[in-house]
Amino acid sequence: MILNKLKFIFNKSLKNYFFYALGEIFLIVAGILIAMKVDNYNSTKKYEKVMDNNFIKVAHELKNNIDNAKISIDLLQNTDSIIRLIMSDTIKSTEYYKNKDFASISMQYMFSTIGIYDYENLINFNVSDNQYHSELISELRLSYGRRDFIMENENIIKNFVKEKSIPFFAENVQSFDEYLYTERINDDMINFISESKDYKMLLSQYAQNNYILLLSYQMFYEDGLKIYNKLAQVYHFEPINTSTHPNIETKIKGKYVSQNLQDTANLIVENDTLYVLNRKNKKKLIRLNDYQYYYKLNDGMYPFMTFNPDSTFNVQIKFIDMLFTKIHE
């Protein structure tokens, strides 16, 4: 009887101890899991804070890159417009003396001003399997991938100048050394540039490289604007508002009359593209810069249109200059 009672008490105590021990283990495991979760949460928050700072730094770097890309685009567009003037025999030989860029245009090359320091820091730090703001990372990779295209094309132009352009002038212009080291325009140089068909062929090759470089900068600029404005939305800073620049095409469209030609021309905008209508002809105008355009005639000539603030524009075809005045209806 007593033995049975002792067994009952022992079994009951053992069972109570077992449940007590099980409860203790559960509390310990739960505590560990909670501690791990809190630690992971704190680590994640710390990681995200560092990433947020990196994204903001990249945004500042990207803003500088966008500004530098715009400067490069303007320079390349200006180079392109000069080349087109030379190729169409619009520039008089006397003008080469006023602007040395006309003579040295095919000897110019650029170095990329697109910085990647903060971008690379962001990419190298963002090594998590579940990347923070992965969609922003993907778009940044695409945008900065354009930089590789820019640098590739810059190297092509640099090599072209060193391997073709400079040797070409050194071989054909006796006084080229004088020009190269003193940058003084001389008759020998200008006469060759003005009359040589081989120079036009060289310049056309340079123009193609210049235009591709221009396109690569424009792609970086457009992609950069998009991702910068997305970063601005996420991190609550001022976006870049390109609408502050007036729509030039819309501003200059309308009906114009030329007194000396006794003719009219209509400028229309279709799908953000400017066209000139003259009688039955419709020609697409190709932008050189904000107020200069050109178009191609059937005989291969390139008339250039320069718009003025006083609602007039000039059309230049070689040495012919025609003035058109806007009709306000």
Image (spheres, rainbow, N blue to C red):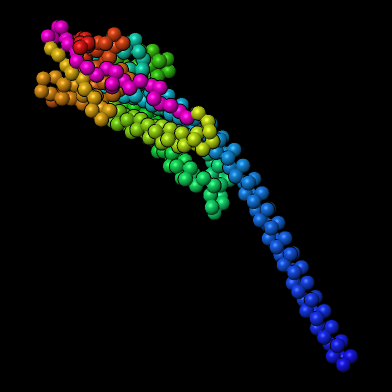
Relative to 127, say whether 254 is above or below. Answer: above
Q: Tell me residue 159's x, y (percent).
A: 38, 33
Q: Residue furthest bottom?
A: 1
- Res. 208 image quadrant: top left
Give the residue furthest to the left. 280
Give, as a single range, the part of the protein colored magenta: 239-262
Picture quadrant where residue 177 is located: top left
Residue 295 can be seen in this image = no
The residue that appears at 68% across and 53% down in the rendered structure is 39
Q: Position of residue 47 (x, y in %)?
A: 62, 46
Left or right, 175 with respect to 32, comes to: left
Visible in this render: residue 298?
Answer: yes
Q: Look at the image and tell me in which quarter the C terminus lies.
A: top left
Residue 171 lies in magenta, yes or no? no
- Name the residue rendered at 35%, 30% in the picture: 214
Asked if the stretch drawn in magenta spans residue 245, the answer is yes
Give the farthest residue toward the top.
260
Q: Residue at x 80, y 81 (%)?
A: 12
Q: Give 70 or 31, whichever is nearer the viewer.
A: 31
Q: Position of residue 170 (x, y in %)?
A: 34, 23
Q: Is residue 170 left or right of residue 13?
A: left
- Residue 185's place in the image compared with 46, above or below, is above
Closer to the camera in the image, 167 or 308: 308
Query: Residue placed at 39% from the left, 25% from the top?
Result: 243
* Viewer-nearest residue: 110 or 239: 239
Find the residue positioned furthest to the front.
1
Rendered view: 92 above or below 230: above
Give the number of marks. 0
- Quadrant showing the N terminus: bottom right
Q: Is residue 3 left or right of residue 210?
A: right
